Image (cartoon, helix red, strand yellow):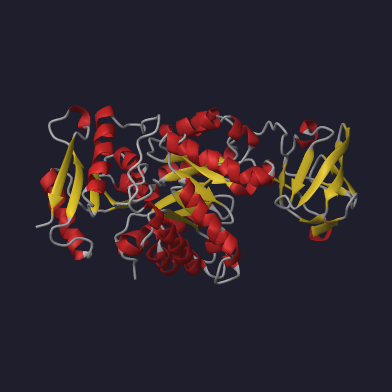
């Protein structure tokens, strides 16, 4: 059974598709439990399998009559270890290992990687982080065909595990040929968002946008912040991207992990300032891969991400390979609902220094006024028709506790509203006139048990304006 509006969080929930939930029934269960966006991890599975997952998501969306967005997350230039003897090595303190060129190690202390220029780009003193940062080495000697490293932090490493090089300037582009193929597939299949991994500067975002534009796709770009270079160019990247993901897995290895909370807050604040949606990702309810209940620290982490101003929280292994994918979504929704109570009674926030892309000045002012009116009269709903989603985004960024109903003639715009905090996209609603919209939404609200006699509904509309701007606020009382 699908959650009623009153028990569905304003904070959006993103769930990663994987073996634990990859069936029509389980995907429908996750949507009913609170999922707004599904993530396809392009680093795993084939395009054929992703196409099957996409079709299952769309079937579930149609059956439940809920617009559900899809995010195709590109793998990017992830550096991985090659094959290890016996598949693993227990690195002891002070142990020395030699990174060599090529694919084949010839001695027990030799390591290979998938990144060919590694030996050229490493320098003495550089750190090499393995196994998600649990094992670290330092380069102590360099030769033409090797880099000798000493273990600083011991631990177990395994074949094909990821490898991070904090502070090392890499020549690898943000996208390789496989990433371009996956981005083209996303555009051709009308996927709503593409996640760009290991962004370093705004040019990386522009390159992906150009590729998508060449396919005449309305697919939007989510830039993943997971390198120090991205933090150094944060404002420029935020301005260029359509949205941001705080990818804490690799970011927490690339920078000092003690700085992660401060950096996360800085990224979220910048996104609020420039009116861009922001996703908080990685290990949010990680223990729920194996447990029905999260830790107290995880619950606090989710709550703080919401209080910081995150638009969406993402589940990775919890739904992809965990034992309790539905329970993880339900818990995320439950924590969000409890945290969002702190927004009740808050005055809508003024717009940031940047106007949402595609939003006209008159519309921006009207949206701001509509939020205040809805707050003052204790309206039950705000309604906006948005052809691209820009107006819905502007309303979302006010953090108004009054839910916003987003309607559109564009099914893609409706799905993409699924990433906007507090916005409920409603399909199959008329958009021709203000009266038709109000009548349809009021009828829906009464049937859904949201509206009763004398409740107020605030509509952001337009009349007689050029260019389709919203220049009118209508206050409607339910008869």
Percent x, y of residue 140: 88, 37
Q: Is residue 141 above or below residue 446?
A: above
> Which of the 4 image quadrants contains residue 442?
bottom left
In the image, is 167 to the left or to the right of 2?
right
Q: In this view, does 39 lie above or below 361?
A: below
Residue at 13% over, 56% down: 478
State the quadrant of the N terminus: bottom left
> Which of the 4 image quadrants contains residue 466?
top left
Q: How many marks?
A: 0
> Which of the 4 image quadrants contains residue 142?
top right
Residue at 42% over, 47% down: 191
State the quadrant of the C terminus: bottom left
Percent x, y of residue 435: 11, 47
Q: Can residue 48 be spotted in the picture? A: no
Residue at 33% over, 47% down: 400
Comparing 293 with 32, the one in front is 293
Comparing 275 with 16, the one in front is 275
Percent x, y of residue 158: 76, 56
Q: Is residue 91 above or below residue 28?
A: above
Percent x, y of residue 54: 43, 55
């Amino acid at each position: 059974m699908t959650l009623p509006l009153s028990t569905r969080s304003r904070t959006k929930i993103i769930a990663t598709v994987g073996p634990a939930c990859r069936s029509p029934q389980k995907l429908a269960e996750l949507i009913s439990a609170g999922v707004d966006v599904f993530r396809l991890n392009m680093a795993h599975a084939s395009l054929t399998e992703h196409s099957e997952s996409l079709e299952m998501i769309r079937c579930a969306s149609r059956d439940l009559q809920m617009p559900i967005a899809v995010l195709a997350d590109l793998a990017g230039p992830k550096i991985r270890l090659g094959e290890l003897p016996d598949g693993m090595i227990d690195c002891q303190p002070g142990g020395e290992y030699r990174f060599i060129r090529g694919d084949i190690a010839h001695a027990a202390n030799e390591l290979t990687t998938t990144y060919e220029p590694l030996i050229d780009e490493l320098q003495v003193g550089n750190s090499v982080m393995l196994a998600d940062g649990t094992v670290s080495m330092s380069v102590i000697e360099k030769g033409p065909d090797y880099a000798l490293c000493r273990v600083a932090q011991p631990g177990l490493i395994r074949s094909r595990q990821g490898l991070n090089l904090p502070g090392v300037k890499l020549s690898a582009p943000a996208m390789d040929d496989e990433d371009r193929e996956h981005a083209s597939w996303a555009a051709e299949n009308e996927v709503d968002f593409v996640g760009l991994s290991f962004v370093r500067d705004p040019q990386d975002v522009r390159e992906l946008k150009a590729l998508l534009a060449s396919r005449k796709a309305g697919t939007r770009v989510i830039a993943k912040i997971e390198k120090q270079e991205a933090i150094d160019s944060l404002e420029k990247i935020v301005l260029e991207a359509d949205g941001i993901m705080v990818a804490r897995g690799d970011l927490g290895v690339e920078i000092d992990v003690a700085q992660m909370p401060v950096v996360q807050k800085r990224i979220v604040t910048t996104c609020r300032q420039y009116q861009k949606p922001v996703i908080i990702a990685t290990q949010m309810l990680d223990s729920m891969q194996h447990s029905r209940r999260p830790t107290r620290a995880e619950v606090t982490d989710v709550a703080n991400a919401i209080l910081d101003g995150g638009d969406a929280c993402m589940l990775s292994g919890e739904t992809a390979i965990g034992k309790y994918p539905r329970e993880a979504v339900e818990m995320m929704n439950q924590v969000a609902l409890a945290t969002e109570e702190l927004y009740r009674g808050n005055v809508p926030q003024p717009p940031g220094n940047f106007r949402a892309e595609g939003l006209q000045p008159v519309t921006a002012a009207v949206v701001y006024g509509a939020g205040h009116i809805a707050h003052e009269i204790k309206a039950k709903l705000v309604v906006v028709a948005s052809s691209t989603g820009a107006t819905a985004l502007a309303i979302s960024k006010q953090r108004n506790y009054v839910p916003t109903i987003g309607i559109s003639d564009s099914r893609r715009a409706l799905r993409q509203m699924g990433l906007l905090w507090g916005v409920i996209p409603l399909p199959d609603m008329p958009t021709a006139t203000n009266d038709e919209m109000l009548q349809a939404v009021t009828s829906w609200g009464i049937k859904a048990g949201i509206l009763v006699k004398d409740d107020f509904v605030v509509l952001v509309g337009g009349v007689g304006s050029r260019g389709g701007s919203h220049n009118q606020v209508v206050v409607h009382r339910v008869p």
